[in-house]
Image: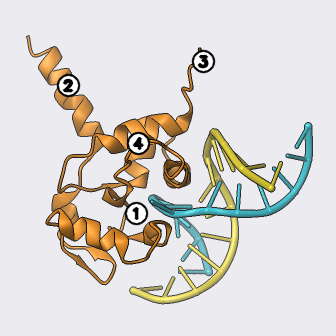
Chain colours: A orange, B cyan, C yellow
Amino acid sequence: MKDQDSFFDRVFELVKQIPYGRVSSYGAIAEYLGIKGSARMVGWAMNASHSRPENIPAHRVVNRQGMLTGKNHFGGPEVMQQLLESEGIEVVNDKIVNFEKLFWNPMQKIENKKTNDSNR
DNA sequence: ATTTTGACGACGT
DNA sequence: GACGTCGCCAAAA
């Protein structure tokens, strides 16, 4: 068997770990993957998510402005916003309200894990 | 192998 | 602050 350690898979893994009612940004994910500055790759990976057998909550991933940039890729420009609102996230003018508060940073996950692991 | 793209981000004007 | 350009890297054509 072959390991598909593609950069895509890593993105999916992380995106799938985004908690309900929370959102993240391409750049943050890219940075987590070690390709900081290449946020485009994350979005590109999302594009590949359509060919994935798994459900990728790509609607929880937006750009730095909290804007639903990729809404056009959900099969409909309204789908993404619907999904977000469905999770209790307010979206106004294709922009997430309180994005700052709803922002989920993957790096935090690492810090938590570290603290939990090396707490003692 | 080369070229183009691509759901971004940061900086410059 | 709106618009322009570059940078970043990997996958598809």
Which quadrant of the structure image shows residue A117? top left
Residue carrying label 1: A63
A31, A45: nearer the viewer: A45
State the SS at label 1. loop
> Which residue appears at 21% of the width and 55% of the height?
A22
Q: What kind of residue is marked 4?
A: Glu
Distance Cα–Cα, label 2 vs label 3: 29 Å
Mark 2 or mark 3, which is nearer to you? 3
Instruction: State if disc 3 and disc 2 touch (CB < 8 Å).
Output: no
Callouts 2 and 3 in the same chain: yes
Residue carrying label 3: A2
Task: State which chain disc 2 sits on.
Answer: A
Please indicate whether residue A30 sits to the left or right of residue A2 in the image: left
Distance Cα–Cα, label 4 vs label 1: 22 Å
Q: What kind of residue is marked 2?
A: Lys
Residue carrying label 4: A54
